[in-house]
Image (cartoon, rainbow, N blue to C red):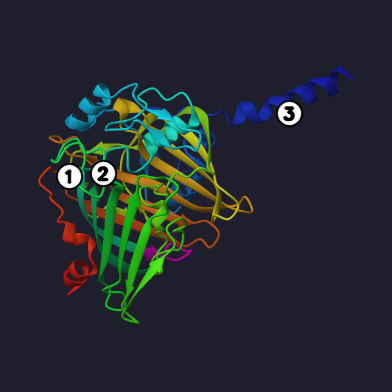
Amino acid sequence: MRRFFLVFIFFLFFPCIVFPQVIIKPGIVINRDNLESYVPSLKSMLPACAHKSLISGIQNGWITLPVVQNEKNYPCPKGFAKATKKYAGTCKIGPKNELIGYVAGIPFPEPKTGAQLAWNCFSEVRRQCSEDIEIYFNNLLFDKNSKKERSVDWILYKKKWKGRTDIPPIPEMPGEEEVLSKESIIVTDPFDAKGFAMIRIRFENIEKPDNVYSYIPAIRRIRRLTGSDLTDPLLGTDEVTDDFEVWRQKINPKMHFKFVGKSKYLVPKVYLERPSEPFLKGNLFQVEWEIRELMILEIKNEPDYAYSKRVIYSSSENNTYLLYNGENFDQKGRLHRSDVILVQFADPETFYRSWHGTLRMDNLSGHSTVMLMYPDLTNKVNIPLSAFTMKYLLGQAR
């Protein structure tokens, strides 16, 4: 009986003795040869959407995962940081999830509730680039075997009407008091999609749907789209308008927010310039990683929206609230689409930060899209109002 008991104890603890959880820390490089020993730690330090993609990339030998010491925390742009300090304590959340008393900056420097964190993370409030944004996109489409299929290029223009802090007029654009921002895209390549255009006008009133128009070259007609649910992929890519910047969906009264907590995660380091090409391997990037604390927010939607739930991961360092990962679940509770930030960089003068490479996954089909971005991170961009007209956009496509 005693022998049986000792054998039982041995096999009970044997897995822990043979396969100890190896701690991930700066200085290590995870590769195909040592991956197995780091799998348990990676599972706890990567969101599910990033874990699956990165593990696959390491197993295929496309990338290694070098972990480096955290560099300095880059601050918010100067004007935005000043506005955050000036207007701290002036905002509150109304009974319908509306943001009351907002002027500029991060509304809740020390969020206490899920709704407060949600507004800090909301695309029209947090600050990465300037108030006037021009970005060139190269979208690379991959099949379920990570084989490149095609590419789609477009230009994005965006102008914020409210909460302006660094480019005059400050703090808001004159006229059109209801407008929160305007955004447009124009496809420039390939030939069969060239000329597709979309304009999105977002209103401050959260109960008022966005105005969304698109020009479809094949029929040479302008069509109006629903402004409350923009979850259809664009032009065969895995890019969804409501998923831009991880989370672009408009906050509405039917949403429910939960601040899940904080945890240490692996995130791509911030480069002061774009990594040298070629660094794209398969549908991933060869970059360095840091360990940083992220805040986890759960967003529950109404039953008639495409996603039943979103889970987003953000950094609160220096009130940046930069989003790193997003997981979107369909109405059956399955992980449908996910967004993994893989390359980011910052301008050392303006402190604007942006992504250069993201991986958008359709986890049900296995299809993915790598989005390469080339934004202007200076304060010299001045987007004309005509950029939000079809005439201007179609002129850019010629």
The residues tagged by marks 1 and 2 sit, at their Cα atoms, a distance apart of 8 Å
Image mark for residue 154: none
**Residue 142 located within the stretch drawn in magenta:** yes
- The answer to which of 350 and 258 lies nearer the viewer is 258
Q: Which residue is mark 1?
A: 377
Q: Which residue is mark 2?
A: 354
**Residue at the far top in the pictured view:** 2
Which residue shows up at 44% across the image and 54% down it?
60
**Residue 187 located within the stretch drawn in magenta:** no
Tell me if residue 298 comes above or below residue 203 in the rendering.
above
The residues tagged by marks 2 and 3 sit, at their Cα atoms, a distance apart of 50 Å
Which residue shows up at 35% across the image and 34% down it?
321
Check disc 1 and give the amino acid type: Leu
Mark 1–mark 2 CB contact (< 8 Å): yes
The residues tagged by marks 3 and 1 sit, at their Cα atoms, a distance apart of 58 Å
- The answer to which of 28 and 387 lies nearer the viewer is 387
Tell me if residue 4 comes above or below residue 337 in the rendering.
above
Q: Which residue is mark 3?
A: 11
